[in-house]
Image (cartoon, helix red, strand yellow):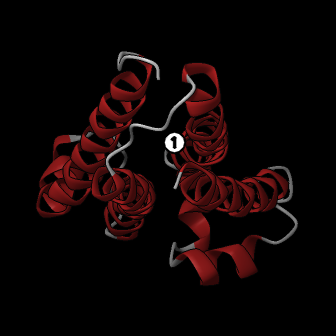
């Protein structure tokens, strides 16, 4: 069981690593490919710079740190913990719930920031103004949902690892 869930987390981490690398290449080339990036991100060309400075770093950092790094670390810990303890005491259902909550949480959180940024800036408002806040208020629950899913994922991960580490060895 631990090898399978570890493998899933490591594969997911590699996908997030690739995404982070692609996003990392987008920031310095924003001026060069302004029209193309505007089209794929649904942000008006005049607002792309604001989007890249206000929302893109949030998306990129969560894909990089929570997606790539945390997924890889979770995979390694799911693999190593039973070897340290001498037995595997993971709850299979909670392991898979941890995995899917983690993946869905990252994607929903980042999609929420993308939606908030593109909708608010497309409406012509500056980020941080009361008009911007009103225009995107109905999309904020998407960000909260992703954040909550990541919190639940973290709690499931802690429970699984601690239940293995704190169980009596054979």
> Which residue is depicted at the point 39% across and 70% down?
122
In the rendered image, is residue 30 in sight? no
Depicted 163 relative to depicted 55: above or below: above
| Tally of numbered discs | 1
Q: Residue furthest front?
A: 170
In the rendered image, is residue 62 in sight? yes
Q: Residue 41: horizontal and vertical position, in percent?
A: 56, 74
Given residues 71 and 52, the one toward you in this image is 71
| Badge 1 density bin: few <14, some 14–19, many ≥20, Cα 10 Å | some
> Which residue is depicted at the point 54% across and 56% down?
5
Given residues 145 and 131, the one toward you in this image is 145
Given residues 159 and 85, the one toward you in this image is 85
Numbered disc 1: secondary structure = helix
Residue 156's image quarter? top left
Given residues 158 and 40, the one toward you in this image is 158
Q: Residue 26: horizontal and vertical position, in percent?
A: 78, 59
> Which residue is depicted at the point 66% across and 58% down?
7
Residue matched to label 1: 58
> Which residue is depicted at the point 41% across and 28% down?
164
Depicted 125 relative to depicted 161: above or below: below
Q: Is residue 73 left or right of residue 30?
A: left
Q: Is residue 75 left or right of residue 114?
A: right
Q: Residue 75: horizontal and vertical position, in percent?
A: 61, 44
Q: Residue 48: horizontal and vertical position, in percent?
A: 60, 62
Residue 103's image quarter? bottom left
Depicted 90 relative to depicted 30: above or below: above
């Amino acid at each position: 069981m631990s090898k399978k869930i570890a493998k899933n987390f490591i594969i997911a981490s590699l996908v997030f690593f690739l995404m982070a690398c692609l996003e990392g290449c987008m920031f310095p080339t924003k001026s060069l490919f302004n029209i193309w990036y505007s089209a794929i991100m649904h942000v008006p060309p005049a607002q792309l710079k604001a989007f890249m400075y206000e929302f893109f770093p949030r998306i990129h950092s969560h894909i990089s740190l929570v997606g790539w790094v945390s997924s890889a670390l979770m995979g390694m810990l799911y693999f190593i913990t039973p070897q340290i303890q001498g037995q595997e005491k993971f709850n299979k259902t909670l392991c898979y719930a941890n995995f899917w909550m983690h993946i869905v949480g990252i994607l929903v959180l980042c999609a929420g920031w993308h939606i908030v940024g593109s909708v608010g800036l497309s409406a012509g408002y500056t980020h941080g103004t009361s008009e911007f806040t009103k225009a995107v208020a109905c999309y904020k629950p998407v960000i909260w949902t992703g954040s909550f899913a990541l919190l639940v994922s973290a709690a499931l991960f802690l429970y699984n690892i601690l239940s293995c580490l704190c169980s009596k060895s054979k």
